[in-house]
Image (cartoon, rainbow, N blue to C red):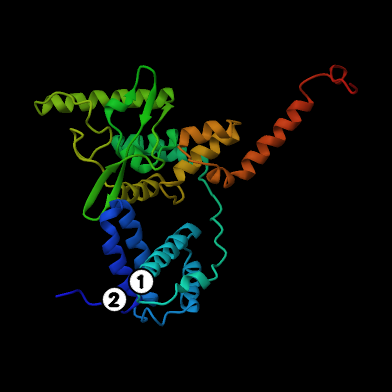
């Protein structure tokens, strides 16, 4: 018996995603499902042939009022555009109504990285009261790595003699569990570790070696550095780490922050110290200058300091005024 023809917006976006799921990654499917959770309650029951641009604009305005970021609303818009184009190709609608939608201003939220004193206090407290999880927090704060990149880190990725780490994979949440994939940009990067980070990782590696011996096993270089079990066989679920991070902030008595704010703190601290934009991009795995624009106030301050430094770098008598 053939499947019933989708009639409502909700049925169309659901049918579109089901058809598309086999051709896209599980993590992308998860992101679209998040978008659908915003679409279905608002306009899901409207017949697809009757949905109007105003209905979609009202949805976006409501999402803005709820505090959704510009990037999240763009994902909702993309899901609607793609699903209604799918419906148009199947003759369910005669035009794609999203083409006439006026998007609300979708500026990015201003970056508000945590204070260095709060990050330092958090790391110190976590290392003392929950050393394994504290090391994960310290690693994220001091390397600027993404949450999923830390989850996917294996001992074979670390060169503790040279105090460096190769970041080439990530753990992402998918329905029912987690999935290992490449980095967000699809490119691996090697970054330096600070001496304290390297020392803590050496101590952690020795503890993992001893755990392997205790369980009658050899230490496996392919085991995970940060794991839910002592043998490094099971990756942390990214959401679990974020929830535990909130509790760690409360226990340390620091203002609430998101786990991802540690990445913003890392980039901010480097730019404030005059580290070049190129180096910060390489270290954080930024694909292009889009993220740099969000730190423009810092780069402008550094540029102004450079202008002053150039004027004061040599005595006036050394500066030729004429050709």
Who is closer to the viewer here, 127 or 137?
137
The numbered mark, 2 or 1, whose residue comes first in the sequence reads 2
Q: CA distance from mark 2 to mark 1?
A: 9 Å
User: Compared to 292, does 205 lie above or below?
Assistant: above
Quadrant placement of the N terminus = bottom left
CB atoms of marks 2 and 1 within 8 Å = yes
Based on the displayed image, in which of its 4 quarters is residue 12 positioned?
Answer: bottom left
Label 1, residues with CA under 10 Å away: few <14, some 14-19, many ≥20 = many
Q: Which mark is residue 273?
A: none
* Residue drawn at x 47%, y 70% as measured from the top left: 98
The reply to whether residue 117 is in sight is: no
For the image, the number of numbered tags is 2
Identity of the residue furthest to the right in this view = 322
Who is closer to the viewer here, 301 or 70?
70
SS at badge 2: loop
Based on the displayed image, in which of its 4 quarters is residue 220 positioned?
Answer: top left
Q: Which mark is residue 87?
A: 1
Q: Which mark is residue 6?
A: 2
User: Compared to 22, does 306 lie above or below?
Assistant: above
């Amino acid at each position: 018996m053939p499947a019933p023809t989708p009639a409502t917006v909700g049925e169309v976006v659901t049918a579109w995603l089901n058809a598309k799921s086999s051709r896209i990654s599980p993590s992308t499917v998860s992101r679209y499902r998040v978008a659908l959770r915003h679409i279905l309650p608002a306009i899901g029951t409207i017949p697809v042939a009757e949905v109007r641009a105003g209905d979609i604009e009202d949805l976006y305005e409501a999402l803005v009022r709820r505090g959704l970021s510009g990037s999240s609303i763009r994902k909702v818009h993309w899901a609607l555009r793609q699903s209604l184009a799918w419906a148009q190709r199947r003759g369910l609608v005669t035009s794609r109504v999203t083409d006439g939608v006026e998007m609300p201003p979708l500026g990015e939220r201003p970056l508000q990285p945590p204070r260095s004193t709060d990050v330092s206090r958090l790391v110190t407290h976590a290392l003392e009261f929950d050393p394994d999880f504290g090391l994960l927090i310290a690693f994220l704060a001091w390397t600027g790595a993404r949450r999923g990149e830390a989850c996917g880190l294996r001992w074979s990725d670390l060169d503790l003699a040279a105090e460096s780490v190769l970041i080439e994979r990530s753990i992402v949440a998918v329905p029912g569990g987690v999935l290992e994939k490449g980095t967000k940009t699809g490119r691996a990067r090697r970054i330096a570790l600070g001496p304290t980070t390297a020392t803590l990782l050496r101590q952690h590696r020795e503890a993992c070696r001893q755990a392997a011996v205790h369980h009658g096993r050899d230490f496996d270089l392919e085991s995970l550095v940060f794991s839910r079990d002592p043998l490094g066989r099971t990756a942390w679920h990214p959401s679990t780490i974020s929830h535990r991070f909130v509790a760690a902030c409360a226990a340390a008595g620091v203002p609430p922050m998101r786990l991802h704010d540690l990445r913003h703190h890392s980039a901010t601290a480097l730019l404030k110290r005059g580290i070049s934009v190129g180096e910060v991009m390489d270290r954080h795995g930024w694909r292009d200058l889009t993220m740099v624009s969000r730190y423009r106030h810092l780069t402008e301050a550094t540029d102004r300091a450079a202008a002053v430094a150039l004027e004061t770098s040599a005595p006036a008598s050394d500066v030729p005024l004429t050709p």
